[in-house]
Image: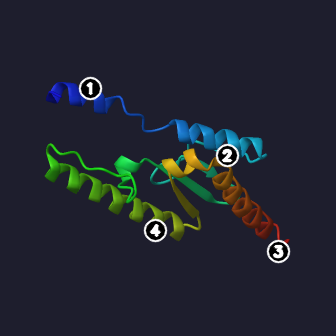
Amino acid sequence: MTPAQRSRCMSRIRSRDTKPELALRRALFGRGLRFRVKSGLKGKPDIVLTRAKIAIFVDGCFWHGCPEHGTSPKSNSAYWTEKLARNRTRDAEVAATLSAQGWHVIRYWDHDVSSDLNRVAQEIETLWRSRALSKVGLT
Protein backbone atom coordinates (compact mmCIF):
# COMPACT_ATOMS: atom_id res chain seq x y z
CA MET A 1 0.00 0.00 0.00
CA THR A 2 1.07 3.53 -0.57
CA PRO A 3 1.23 5.79 2.48
CA ALA A 4 -1.96 7.54 1.33
CA GLN A 5 -3.80 4.23 0.95
CA ARG A 6 -2.62 3.03 4.35
CA SER A 7 -3.66 6.32 5.95
CA ARG A 8 -7.13 6.04 4.45
CA CYS A 9 -7.42 2.43 5.57
CA MET A 10 -6.32 3.18 9.15
CA SER A 11 -8.65 6.19 9.40
CA ARG A 12 -11.63 3.90 8.73
CA ILE A 13 -11.04 1.77 11.83
CA ARG A 14 -13.75 2.32 14.43
CA SER A 15 -12.87 3.28 17.97
CA ARG A 16 -16.36 2.61 19.31
CA ASP A 17 -19.47 0.66 18.41
CA THR A 18 -17.45 -2.25 17.06
CA LYS A 19 -19.22 -5.54 16.35
CA PRO A 20 -17.99 -7.19 19.58
CA GLU A 21 -19.06 -4.14 21.64
CA LEU A 22 -22.52 -4.08 20.07
CA ALA A 23 -22.96 -7.82 20.59
CA LEU A 24 -21.94 -7.53 24.25
CA ARG A 25 -24.28 -4.59 24.82
CA ARG A 26 -27.18 -6.54 23.30
CA ALA A 27 -26.38 -9.57 25.48
CA LEU A 28 -26.18 -7.48 28.67
CA PHE A 29 -29.38 -5.61 27.84
CA GLY A 30 -31.10 -8.95 27.21
CA ARG A 31 -30.05 -10.04 30.70
CA GLY A 32 -31.72 -6.97 32.18
CA LEU A 33 -28.58 -4.93 32.82
CA ARG A 34 -28.79 -1.23 32.08
CA PHE A 35 -25.65 0.69 31.30
CA ARG A 36 -24.13 3.77 29.76
CA VAL A 37 -21.90 3.90 26.72
CA LYS A 38 -20.81 7.50 27.18
CA SER A 39 -19.30 8.67 30.42
CA GLY A 40 -16.80 11.18 31.66
CA LEU A 41 -14.57 8.43 32.99
CA LYS A 42 -10.88 8.33 32.16
CA GLY A 43 -10.09 6.01 29.28
CA LYS A 44 -13.64 6.10 27.88
CA PRO A 45 -14.88 2.63 28.88
CA ASP A 46 -17.01 0.91 26.25
CA ILE A 47 -19.72 -0.03 28.77
CA VAL A 48 -20.31 1.49 32.21
CA LEU A 49 -22.56 -0.04 34.86
CA THR A 50 -22.82 3.06 37.03
CA ARG A 51 -24.59 1.80 40.15
CA ALA A 52 -22.24 -1.15 40.57
CA LYS A 53 -19.26 0.99 39.47
CA ILE A 54 -18.10 -1.44 36.78
CA ALA A 55 -16.15 -0.15 33.76
CA ILE A 56 -15.86 -2.57 30.84
CA PHE A 57 -13.38 -2.28 27.99
CA VAL A 58 -13.47 -4.41 24.84
CA ASP A 59 -9.92 -4.20 23.50
CA GLY A 60 -8.99 -4.82 19.89
CA CYS A 61 -6.21 -7.35 19.38
CA PHE A 62 -4.10 -5.08 17.19
CA TRP A 63 -4.41 -1.80 19.07
CA HIS A 64 -3.94 -3.23 22.55
CA GLY A 65 -1.31 -5.87 21.75
CA CYS A 66 -3.14 -9.14 22.30
CA PRO A 67 -0.53 -11.82 23.09
CA GLU A 68 -2.56 -14.36 21.11
CA HIS A 69 -3.62 -12.41 18.00
CA GLY A 70 -1.76 -9.10 18.10
CA THR A 71 0.52 -8.35 15.17
CA SER A 72 2.97 -5.60 14.40
CA PRO A 73 3.15 -4.09 10.92
CA LYS A 74 6.31 -4.82 8.97
CA SER A 75 6.64 -1.28 7.63
CA ASN A 76 7.68 1.39 10.10
CA SER A 77 8.00 -1.30 12.76
CA ALA A 78 9.91 0.88 15.25
CA TYR A 79 7.01 3.36 15.35
CA TRP A 80 4.40 0.62 15.77
CA THR A 81 6.32 -1.21 18.47
CA GLU A 82 6.54 1.99 20.49
CA LYS A 83 2.91 2.97 19.75
CA LEU A 84 1.49 -0.38 20.86
CA ALA A 85 3.67 -0.33 24.00
CA ARG A 86 2.31 3.15 24.83
CA ASN A 87 -1.24 1.84 24.38
CA ARG A 88 -0.62 -0.99 26.87
CA THR A 89 0.96 1.43 29.34
CA ARG A 90 -2.00 3.79 28.99
CA ASP A 91 -4.43 0.88 29.54
CA ALA A 92 -2.66 0.01 32.81
CA GLU A 93 -2.69 3.64 33.97
CA VAL A 94 -6.41 3.99 33.18
CA ALA A 95 -7.20 0.79 35.10
CA ALA A 96 -5.17 1.97 38.10
CA THR A 97 -6.85 5.39 38.12
CA LEU A 98 -10.36 3.96 37.87
CA SER A 99 -9.63 1.32 40.53
CA ALA A 100 -8.37 4.05 42.88
CA GLN A 101 -11.72 5.80 42.35
CA GLY A 102 -13.62 2.67 43.42
CA TRP A 103 -14.41 1.28 39.97
CA HIS A 104 -14.07 -2.39 39.10
CA VAL A 105 -12.32 -2.47 35.72
CA ILE A 106 -12.85 -5.41 33.37
CA ARG A 107 -11.01 -5.85 30.07
CA TYR A 108 -11.96 -8.38 27.40
CA TRP A 109 -10.25 -9.01 24.10
CA ASP A 110 -12.58 -8.59 21.15
CA HIS A 111 -11.95 -12.24 20.18
CA ASP A 112 -13.14 -13.37 23.64
CA VAL A 113 -16.41 -11.52 23.17
CA SER A 114 -16.82 -12.81 19.62
CA SER A 115 -15.99 -16.43 20.42
CA ASP A 116 -17.78 -16.85 23.78
CA LEU A 117 -20.29 -14.04 24.21
CA ASN A 118 -22.48 -15.98 26.65
CA ARG A 119 -19.57 -16.64 29.05
CA VAL A 120 -18.47 -12.98 28.98
CA ALA A 121 -22.03 -11.72 29.57
CA GLN A 122 -22.49 -14.24 32.41
CA GLU A 123 -19.26 -13.11 34.10
CA ILE A 124 -20.35 -9.48 33.92
CA GLU A 125 -23.85 -10.25 35.18
CA THR A 126 -22.46 -12.26 38.11
CA LEU A 127 -20.09 -9.44 39.07
CA TRP A 128 -22.87 -6.87 38.66
CA ARG A 129 -25.20 -8.85 40.93
CA SER A 130 -22.56 -9.27 43.64
CA ARG A 131 -21.62 -5.56 43.58
CA ALA A 132 -25.23 -4.38 43.40
CA LEU A 133 -26.24 -6.58 46.35
CA SER A 134 -23.27 -5.47 48.44
CA LYS A 135 -24.24 -1.82 47.89
CA VAL A 136 -27.66 -2.40 49.42
CA GLY A 137 -26.22 -4.52 52.23
CA LEU A 138 -27.65 -7.88 51.21
CA THR A 139 -24.36 -9.80 51.15
Disc on the earlier residue, 2 or 4 = 2
The residue identified by callout 3 is: 139
Regarding mark 1 in the picture, which secondary structure is present there? helix
Tell me whether circle 2 and circle 1 mark residues in contact (CB < 8 Å). no
Image position of 115 with respect to 23: above or below: below
Regarding mark 2 in the picture, which secondary structure is present there? loop
Tell me whether circle 2 and circle 4 mark residues in contact (CB < 8 Å). no
Q: Residue at x 16, y 49 (%)?
A: 77
- Gap between marks 4 and 1, in whole Å? 34 Å
The residue identified by callout 1 is: 8
The residue identified by callout 4 is: 96
* Quadrant of the drawing holding the N terminus: top left
Disc on the earlier residue, 2 or 1 = 1
Q: Closer to us: mark 4 or mark 1?
A: 1
Disc on the earlier residue, 4 or 1 = 1
Q: Which mark is residue 35?
A: 2
Q: Position of residue 4 (x, y in %)?
A: 17, 25
